Each structure stands twice: as C-alpha cells, then as structure tokens.
Amino acid sequence: MRKQIAAANWKMNLTLTEGIQLAEDILKNEFDLNKSRAVLMAVPFPYLISIQQLLKGQANIHVCAQNCASTKNGAYTGEVSAEMLNSIGVHYVLIGHSERREYYHEDNALLAAKVNLALANEVVPVFCCGEPLAVREAETQNAFVENQLKESIFHLSADQMKGFIIAYEPIWAIGTGKTASSDQAQELHAHIRSVIAAQYGAEVAESVTILYGGSVKAANAADIFGKPDVDGGLVGGASLIASEFSTIIKSLK
Ligand code: PEP
C-alpha cells in the first residue's frame, strides 16, 4: 500500500513549552504505525530540534519544517535553506502551503525551485496545492490544480515522482470549519492521480501519497481517509489538540 500520512501543521502557534506538552500528550497514545503509515509534525523552525529529540525512538513519527528557502544559501536574511534542514536531520518540509502562496506571494515557479532544493538535500517535500473559492464556484478547480502541479513538480523525473507526497487543500476549507465532502475530496484526488498517470504512467501515480487538508478533525477523518484516493491528511487547527490529532492518526487506512 502507498504511504498513509497524518501530518500536523502547527503554523505559527504555541510556545516551545506548549508544543512539547502537546507532542508528549500525543505520544501517550498507542499508534499502529508501520511501513505504510507515518505521522509528520510540521512545527515552527525554532522547535524542530527539541521536538525531534522528543520523537527519538518513535518509529514513523517525524518532524517536518513548514517552509524552506528557494535559494541555496547566501545573503537572504531570515531564510532557512533545505541544506540547513538536512544538516539538523530534518527530512520533511511543507512546500507551497496556501498561506505562503497568499501572504508571501509564492508562485508556482518559485515553488518548483524549493522542490528542487529540498530533493537535492534529501528533504522530502510535502507539496501543497488547492484552489480558492472563486475557482471552485466557477467549477474550474481541476484545471487550476493541474496547472499548479504542471508548473511546480512535473519537471521531476519519474524516479523523483515515485512515492512523492502531495497535499490537496481547497483554500476555502482551510481554517474555515468548511470541509470538502469526502466525495469532493475523492473526486479531486482521483483527478490529481489521473493527471500524474498521464504524465508518468499508472505505476508512479499509484505510488504517490495524496493528503487531504481543510478542516479535518477527529469527527470527519475516518470518512475522508476512507476514500480510495485519499491517503491521509494535512491538519491545522485540530492538530493543536492532542486528543483530536491522536484520533486522526488512528483514522489512517
Ligand atoms: C492547514 O493548515 O493545512 C489546514 C488544513 O488547516 P485546518 O485543518 O485548520 O483547516
């Protein structure tokens, strides 16, 4: 089975003490994680090493950065490179979250550069895509998401695309309490998989993990994750509550 993933996105929330408490509370639960199930915790940069220490010895639970620079190194005050992440043993990074696209004007070309740098530095990108409300209302979400993939990741080789991780997050469902229905999620995920299949072949497409993001919570996770092309979730608000996120992890296929 392709990898099923529950990914927490803490965004710019929690003090270090609160974050450690949250991670400890989550770890009090027993999870049936194995080769095909994993948990990611995308925490703020300053907490990566502390949370990584706390997760030491936990099989298949990894820290993840929320961003990395689009340039290799140099005079870019405030930026954190993929190479730096690798150097502290962080091997996952969110790239292209809609909040970064919207507030920091990250476009598809810039995100392609970030994806390349992550891969070159052995950091696995979790590539985020998804349409705004106006696009959904115009019913052009398939073409919109397809274009995001084409411009940011379809330059990759088939080998690089094998096992790649994508998070589909309709912007109108992020942090709004409005969730796409499990059928709407499945429909878009199936479309993403078919576009990957057209570009790279069915075998590669079948290996790609596609997470759903947008107001996932304990109460709806099993329904959404139960859909055949949904391979887990990227979770914001509910990942800040230990009991919620623990149930979400347990809802993985
Ligand atoms: C997110 O931050 O990626 C997200 C999906 O947030 P929320 O779960 O709060 O909608």
Image (tube, rainbow, N blue to C red):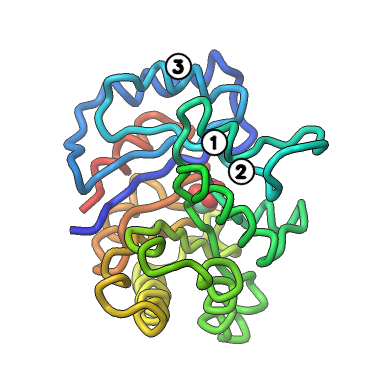
Residue type at mark 2 is: Asn
Q: Name the residue carrying label 3.
A: 21
Residue type at mark 3 is: Gln
Q: Name the residue carrying label 1.
A: 10
Secondary structure category for the residue under label 3: helix
Secondary structure category for the residue under label 2: loop
Residue at mark 3 to residue at mark 2: CA–CA distance: 23 Å
Q: Position of residue 124 (x, y in %)?
A: 45, 47
Q: Using the rendered view, name the quadrant where residue 208 is placed.
A: bottom left
Horizontal side of residue 3 vs 115, given as left or right: left
Horizontal side of residue 4 vs 188, given as left or right: left
Residue at screen point 45% across, 16% down = 21
- Is residue 188 shown above or below 64? below
Q: Position of residue 145 (x, y in %)?
A: 54, 75
The answer to which of marks 1 and 3 sits earlier in the sequence is: 1
Residue type at mark 1 is: Trp
Residue at screen point 60% across, 38% down = 11
Q: Using the rendered view, name the quadrant where residue 239 is placed.
A: top left
Q: Nearer the viewer, mark 2 or mark 1?
A: 2
Residue at screen point 33% across, 54% down = 232
Label 1 CA crowd tier, 10 Å (few <14, some 14–19, many 20+): some
Horizontal side of residue 159 vs 128, given as left or right: left
Q: Name the residue carrying label 2.
A: 67
- Is residue 123 shown above or below 216? above
Instruction: Choose between 173 and 198: the one closer to the eye.
Output: 198
- Is residue 127 shown above or below 29? below
